[in-house]
Amino acid sequence: MAAVVSTVGKYASLVKFAHTVFALPFALVAFLLALREPDARFTWVLLLQVLACMVFARNAAMGFNRYADREIDARNPRTAGRDVPAGRITPRQALTFTLVNAALFVAVAWTINPLCGGLSFVALAVLLGYSYLKRLTWLCHFGVGAALCIAPAGAFIAVTGRMTPAVALLSLMVFFWSSGFDILYSLADEEIDRAQGLHSIPQRFGRRRAMAIARCVHLLEFVLVPLFLVRAGLTDVWGIAAGVSFLALLVWQHAILSPDDLSRLNAAFFTANGIASLVFCVLVYLSVLV
């Protein structure tokens, strides 16, 4: 039993399982909105299928990212302690973990409906491919956004087999939100990215301009969030509170950072965004169910 617990803990560390707080709440929001559609029907099996797809897809993405970036991470003092460069997990184990989770993701997606099954291959291409973008372009942050915005779209399609304008807006919200916070997070690696020949917005434009670009990306949320709430019919006090709290936490994460002081970067990245997604999800559920 101790060996099993140790193995589970090792791979949970590999994929930073706690970071599911970024995408999973939005998938649950989309799942709830899907259940309001006329032909939708809730089953516990379907909910478990959606959650399993989320877990397997994210495991595959993170496992492959750690495998693909193992040499880059080893040369970066901030990431040298990660499981693969530190030797706690071998590259072969990380790749095997990726392949197993990718296969499970595709298999479960096919059990939901044929559209989910077919789209699972497109999703995997995005989830695995974004790991290489920083080798090619400073627009790599938007690859992270594309990977995360799949979650709400996939959850909705799993229930209904189609998309709606409201869920498209929700996916765009997640796209620009996560792209913007990835720009901020990459500020910590500006110099090492430049030294390793990697691409990022901070590496390309410098810290001050990168922070300005992140603010511009997040400003789009002040249009997308109200549009989503109106289109989804979430205009009661709970829905408005969901939008206001989400936008307030975006403002806060920018307010606590400055080009000359990144000491609160983890608070801006993990704390603000984790709380934003969870609070948004809870308040949307209250809007629909109360």
Image (spheres, grey):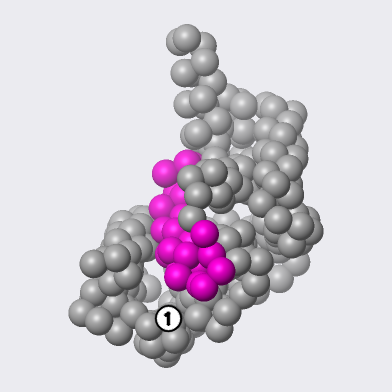
Q: Relative to the observer, which residue lies in front, 184 or 75?
A: 184
Inspect the magenta stretch and tell me whether residue 138 lies in it. Answer: no
Q: How many marks?
A: 1
The quarter of the rendered structure image containing the C terminus is bottom left
Query: Residue at 50% of width from left, 34% of height from top?
Result: 12
Judging by the rendered image, the residue that carries numbered circle 1 is: 232
User: Which quadrant holds residue 105?
Assistant: top right
**Circle 1 residues within 10 Å: few <14, some 14–19, many ≥20:** some
Inspect the magenta stretch and tell me whether residue 31 lies in it. Answer: yes
Which x, y percent locates residue 203? Answer: 58, 70
User: Which quadrant holds residue 156?
Assistant: bottom right
Residue stretch rendered in magenta on the structure: 16-41
Query: Residue at 69% of width from left, 39% of height from top?
Result: 104
Vertical relation: 200 (above or below) 41: below
Q: Main secondary structure of the magenta part?
A: helix
Query: Residue at 24% of width from left, 74% of height from top?
Result: 238
